[in-house]
Image (tube, helix red, strand yellow):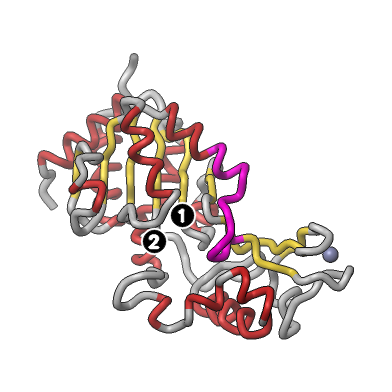
Amino acid sequence: MSDSPELRRAAEAIRKSRKLAAFTGAGISVESGIPPFRGSNGIWNRYDSSLLDIDRFLRSPARSWEAIKAMFTGFLATADRAPVAPNPAHRVLAKWEAEGRLAGVITQNIDGLHTTAGSRNVIEYHGHCRTMTCLDCGKTVPLTAESTAADVPRCSCGGLLKPDFIFFGEGIPPKAARDAEELAATCDCMVLVGTSGAVYPAAALPPAAKRRGATIVEINPEPTAYTERGVTDVFIARKAGEAMTALDRLVSADGKDGE
Ligand SMILES: [Zn+2]
């Protein structure tokens, strides 16, 4: 693969960055075999998305849990099993963090693959599937095959247990929202991988970083709202794994810049 001018510009921005952030969405996990939620091959073509409305869950939890369990079996890692593995794009981000190049990853994904790949500072903006919380007493328990064996998993207090990813109609977890806003406001370069900027409030984070002067590098197979609205400074029109592998080679070859 030849190095396009865009790849070289992106590598330079990443090398020069003093506080690099990543912002990821469904597109980074597609190469791991996780279908996107939206689009023609999306999860919402197979499952009724209203099953993940919080109001519907509260009204008919058994129906919602049936769909949730199918997603866990198919592609979402829980505390005790991982149906899919991270791909090179996840691994490069983990490597950059270990090398001190990357401050953290803000992800919209609930698949846990950044953590599995070895990333440590992962801000899971929409939550995750490792635990669930009792809606009555607030107790948190690991989400496992055993703890979700019942048709409707319940807490020892009898309350309804809900997985710790956000359902439609719920707000962003407060700590994740604060951490993401802070990272977006203080980074000087943000690499967007596999996210089209369609889902709010997450989609507002890259423009917030841009307003504070950050350079925005975007990796997506096709242009998105970010590209079209001028948020993106450097656009790399490639799949996540391929682009991140090429970027890592360029960034590593040149060594880490001094001040
Ligand atoms: Zn409880």
Residue 14, by quadrant, is top left
**CB within 8 Å, label 2 to label 1:** yes
Image position, residue 37 (x, y; %): 41, 70
To which residue does mark 1 refer?
108
Q: Tag 1: residue type?
A: Gln
Gap between marks 2 and 1 measured at Cα: 7 Å
Q: Quadrant of the C terminus?
A: top left
Q: Which residue shows up at 49% across the image and 73% down it? A: 75
Q: Relative to the observer, which residue lies in front, 133 or 20?
A: 133
- Label 1 sits on a secondary structure element that is loop
Q: Tag 2: residue type?
A: Ala
Q: Is residue 31 left or right of residue 225?
A: right
Q: Earlier in the sequence, mark 2 or mark 1?
A: 2
- In the image, the residue with mark 1 has its CB under 8 Å from the nearest atom of ligand 1: no
- Compared to residue 95, the image places residue 35 above or below, namely below
Query: Does the magenta portion include 169?
Result: yes
- Ligand 1: image quarter: bottom right
Q: Which residue shows up at 62% across the image and 42% down it? A: 175
* Residue 45 visible in the snapshot: yes
Magenta span = 165-179
Classed neighbour count for the residue bearing mark 2: other residues with Cα under 10 Å, few (<14), some (14–19), many (≥20): many
Q: Relative to the observer, which residue lies in front, 206 or 3?
A: 206
- In the image, the residue with mark 2 has its CB under 8 Å from the nearest atom of ligand 1: no
* Residue 92 visible in the snapshot: no
- Label 2 sits on a secondary structure element that is helix
To which residue does mark 2 refer?
26
Query: Does the magenta portion include 255?
Result: no
- Compared to residue 252, the image places residue 66 above or below, namely below
Q: Which residue shows up at 33% across the image and 46% down it? A: 192
Q: Is residue 221 left or right of residue 177?
A: left
Q: Is residue 24 left or right of residue 145?
A: left
Residue 20, by quadrant, is top left
